[in-house]
């Protein structure tokens, strides 16, 4: 039986929450789901439906041009990452003036971490095997595909499908077989004994077997100026934040499929898109390269890297400079926004020193399987795949991990 901690909220002292959001924004969904889980009501303003509120949001958030932007009792909390940082530090309830009762340990035969194609596929297969899986959404419900506007290479969709719609369909399919989905992420694990123990703030979960499908998150360049203007001109999600740059010039940095797709998507809003790439040829698929090279709104800045993001505290980012790696020439681009699409880092920090992984942090299962070096722990998807990194391969690995898990449990 599953016991849930109880959130006690009184109407008299409950913090008033305001969230600025837009459609097709996984970070907005994540923030709202956290408040829903805590049973905290909130006021939502969709800036894509009410564009007149866009400048109000930017002004109130001191220049931030990303969604969501969250306010509690008129205090600016920040975006989704800021909200979850407060939650992980145990400070959010104090701001909301709520209390949580002490939680009992909640046990499952199978717990799955992550709700991308790998996690949802693993859930579908283990649920159909009557293992009643519990799946944690992670900080980005639906994974990386929720920041993708169009998926053209997932089998079964002749004309392609929006990334959000694809992940919503997978979620509904998992729920159809009675998968239970818990919003949020696990903050600590103990794999040293059976059953395994997993912690989500003050809640404790145990399981006989664990499937890790935590995926990967976007990398940033590591520039001090980039960090200074993050959310104030610098973003890692064109789908979420391209709306803010309607009629303006922006830049995308990267040369893979993600960068090419973000550049193409931004042409729906922006006057011009500069695609900055450090080499003289792109790394993305031939189909995506053809689309970008044929788009008159996209200008590729070859053999170049970002030297510095320019701006000030009042205006946020105002421009950036690029450096040609062959000539050493530095020049401004005349852009108001920068979208970083240079790859991803596997989400494996929870398992460092416990599970086998390579130098980059990707998990290393036993050859020909999804089994990790601890019995009962399995991995699938981008958290273990640094080579293919496709939705369809992630889904296939989710199937493999589920079958490995089912057979392992049957042998116990």
Image (tube, rainbow, N blue to C red):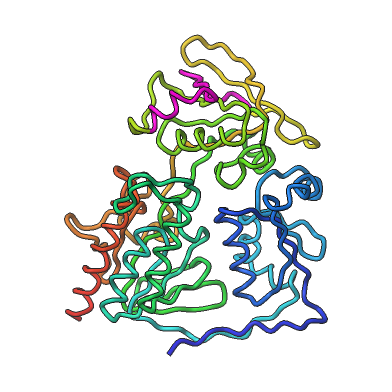
Please provide percent x and percent y for residue 290.
38, 27
Residue depicted at 71% across the width and 73% down the height: 41
User: 324 left or right of 211?
Assistant: right
**Front residue (pair 48, 96):** 48
Q: Is residue 64 above or below residue 139?
A: above
Considering every residue shown, the one lying at the far top of the view is 327
Considering every residue shown, the one lying at the far bottom of the view is 1
User: 240 left or right of 166?
Assistant: right
Quadrant for the N terminus in the image:
bottom left
In the picture, residue 7 is in which quadrant? bottom right
Q: Is residue 67 above or below residue 177?
A: above
Count up the numbered dots: 0
Residue depicted at 49% across the width and 21% down the height: 300
User: 223 left or right of 130?
Assistant: right
What range is drawn magenta here? 288-308
Residue depicted at 51% across the width and 20% down the height: 301
Quadrant for the C terminus in the image:
bottom left
In the picture, residue 207 is in which quadrant? bottom left
Tell whether position 299 is magenta: yes
Tell whether position 16 is magenta: no
Residue depicted at 38% across the width and 47% down the height: 160
Considering every residue shown, the one lying at the far front of the view is 159
**Front residue (pair 385, 298):** 298
Please provide percent x and percent y for residue 387.
29, 42
Please provide percent x and percent y for residue 191.
36, 71
Please provide percent x and percent y for residue 340.
53, 36
């Amino acid at each position: 039986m599953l016991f849930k901690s109880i959130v006690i909220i009184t109407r008299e002292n409950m913090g008033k929450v305001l969230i600025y959001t837009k459609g097709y924004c996984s970070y907005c969904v994540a923030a709202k789901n956290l408040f829903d889980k805590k049973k905290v009501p909130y006021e939502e303003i969709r800036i894509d439906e009410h564009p007149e509120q866009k400048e109000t949001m930017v002004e109130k958030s001191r220049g931030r041009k990303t969604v969501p932007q969250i306010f509690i009792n008129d205090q600016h909390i920040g975006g989704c990452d800021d909200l979850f940082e407060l939650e992980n530090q145990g400070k959010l309830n104090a701001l909301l003036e709520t209390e949580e009762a002490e939680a009992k340990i909640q046990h499952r035969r199978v717990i799955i971490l992550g709700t991308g194609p790998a996690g949802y596929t693993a859930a579908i297969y283990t649920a159909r095997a009557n293992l009643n899986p519990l799946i944690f959404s992670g900080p980005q419900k639906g994974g990386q595909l929720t920041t993708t506007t169009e998926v053209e290479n997932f089998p079964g969709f002749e004309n392609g499908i929006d990334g959000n719609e694809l992940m919503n369909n997978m979620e509904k399919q998992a729920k159809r077989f009675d998968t239970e989905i818990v919003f949020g992420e696990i903050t600590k694990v103990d794999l040293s004994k059976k059953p395994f123990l997993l912690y989500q703030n003050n809640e404790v979960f145990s399981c006989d077997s664990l499937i890790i499908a935590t995926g990967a998150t976007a990398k940033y360049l590591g520039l001090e100026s980039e960090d200074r203007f993050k959310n104030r001109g610098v973003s890692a999600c064109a789908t979420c934040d391209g709306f803010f740059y309607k009629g303006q010039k922006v830049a995308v940095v990267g040369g893979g499929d993600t960068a090419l797709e973000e550049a193409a998507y931004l042409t729906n809003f922006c006057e011009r898109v500069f695609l900055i790439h450090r080499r003289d040829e792109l790394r993305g698929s031939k189909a995506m390269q053809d689309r970008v090279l044929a788009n008159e709104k996209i200008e590729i800045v070859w053999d170049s890297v970002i030297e510095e993001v320019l701006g000030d505290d009042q205006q946020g980012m105002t421009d950036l400079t690029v450096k040609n790696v062959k000539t050493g020439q530095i020049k401004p681009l005349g852009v108001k926004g920068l979208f970083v699409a240079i790859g991803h880092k596997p989400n494996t920090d929870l398992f460092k020193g416990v599970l086998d992984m390579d130098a980059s942090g990707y998990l290393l299962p036993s050859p020909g399987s999804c089994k990790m070096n601890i019995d009962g722990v399995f991995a699938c998807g981008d958290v273990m795949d640094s080579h293919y990194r496709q939705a369809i391969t992630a889904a296939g690995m989710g199937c493999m991990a589920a079958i490995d898990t089912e057979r392992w449990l049957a042998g116990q």
